Amino acid sequence: MDFEQTMMELLINAGEARSHAMSAIQFARQRNWQQADNALAASLAASKQAHHIQTQLIGADEGCGKVPVTLILVHAQDHLMNAMLCRDLAEELVMLRKELAGVAVQESGLAG
């Protein structure tokens, strides 16, 4: 496993997840519900990919410190956790805006 490449992929996917979550909020503000839902789905997909990479790193470490803890790894982990939180909050904000606009709201099933 190329750890530097893996960490960069983690950063890219986490950043994409956060970006899509923020887009969902902006689409909801514009009452563009379909685009908001699409952005939430894209955020979830990127988040799942980032989580998969994180799981690979954990597996490679085997609980033995085999993966070097570098500043870039800590940075990537920070991005992932922030992206996951941002996505969760974006889902709630989109649902809230739908409720306020009188749009029928159903549970999205997007929570990952």
Image (cartoon, rainbow, N blue to C red):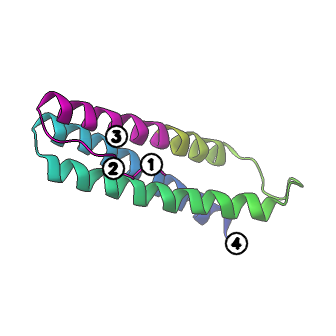
Mark 1 in CB contact with mark 2 (< 8 angstroms): yes
Residue that numbered label 4 is attached to: 1
The CA span between labels 2 and 4 is 36 Å
- Out of 88 and 61, give the one closest to the viewer: 88
Mark 1 in CB contact with mark 3 (< 8 angstroms): yes
- CA neighbours of label 1 inside 10 A, class few (<14), some (14 to 19), many (20+): few
| Disc 4 element | loop
Residue that numbered label 1 is attached to: 111
Residue that numbered label 3 is attached to: 91
Residue that numbered label 2 is attached to: 108
Task: Tell which tag, 3 or 2, sits nearer the viewer.
Answer: 2
| Disc 1 element | loop
Which amino acid, mark 3?
Glu
| Earlier-in-chain disc, 1 versus 3 | 3
- Out of 12 and 43, give the one closest to the viewer: 43
Q: Which mark is residue 44?
A: none
As drawn, is 58 to the left or to the right of 91?
Answer: right
Which amino acid, mark 4?
Met
